Image (spheres, rainbow, N blue to C red):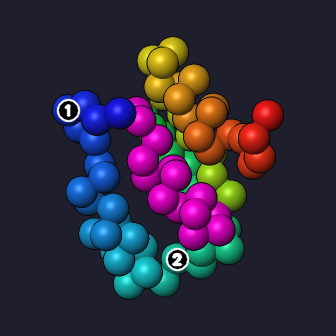
Amino acid sequence: MKYLGNKSRLLPFIHNSLEVSGVNFDLSLTDLFGGTGSVAQHFKKQGMAVTGNDFMTYSYQMMKATIGLNQAP
């Protein structure tokens, strides 16, 4: 799902910024105001333990389905 404010286009910048800062990708990441969860999904694919958060119910449900499940139900 795309909507205004989606950070999919910024993922390379965010990822590179964290690498330059020396972030250990074996750690965990918290995506506050997660929205569609695109940032959380990206870093979960990189092997990080990810926690997503959003006030909107549909955003919470979307992140629960995409980053909360580690295998198909």
Asked whether, in this view, residue 73 is left or right of residue 18, the answer is right
Which residue is at the far left? 4
Would you say residue 21 is visible in this rendering? Answer: no
Which residue is at the far front? 72
- Residue drawn at the location 56% of the way across and 35% of the way down: 63
Dot 1: what SS?
Answer: loop
- Residue drawn at the location 64% of the way across and 64% of the way down: 48
Asked whether, in this view, residue 18 is left or right of residue 9, the answer is right
Q: In the rendered view of the protein, which quadrant contains the N terminus? A: top left
Disc 1 from disc 2: Cα separation: 28 Å
Dot 2: what SS?
Answer: loop
Which residue type carries mark 2? Val
In terms of sequence position, does the residue under pointer 1 or pointer 2 come before the other? 1
Q: In the rendered view of the protein, which quadrant contains the C terminus? A: top right
Q: Which residues are magenta?
A: 35-48
Q: Position of residue 8 (x, y in %)?
A: 30, 52
Q: Which residue is mark 1?
A: 4
Residue 45 lies within the magenta run:
yes
- Residue drawn at the location 63% of the way across and 32% of the way down: 64
Q: Residues within 10 Å of mark 2 (few under 14, many from 20)?
A: few
In the image, which disc is placed on residue 23? 2
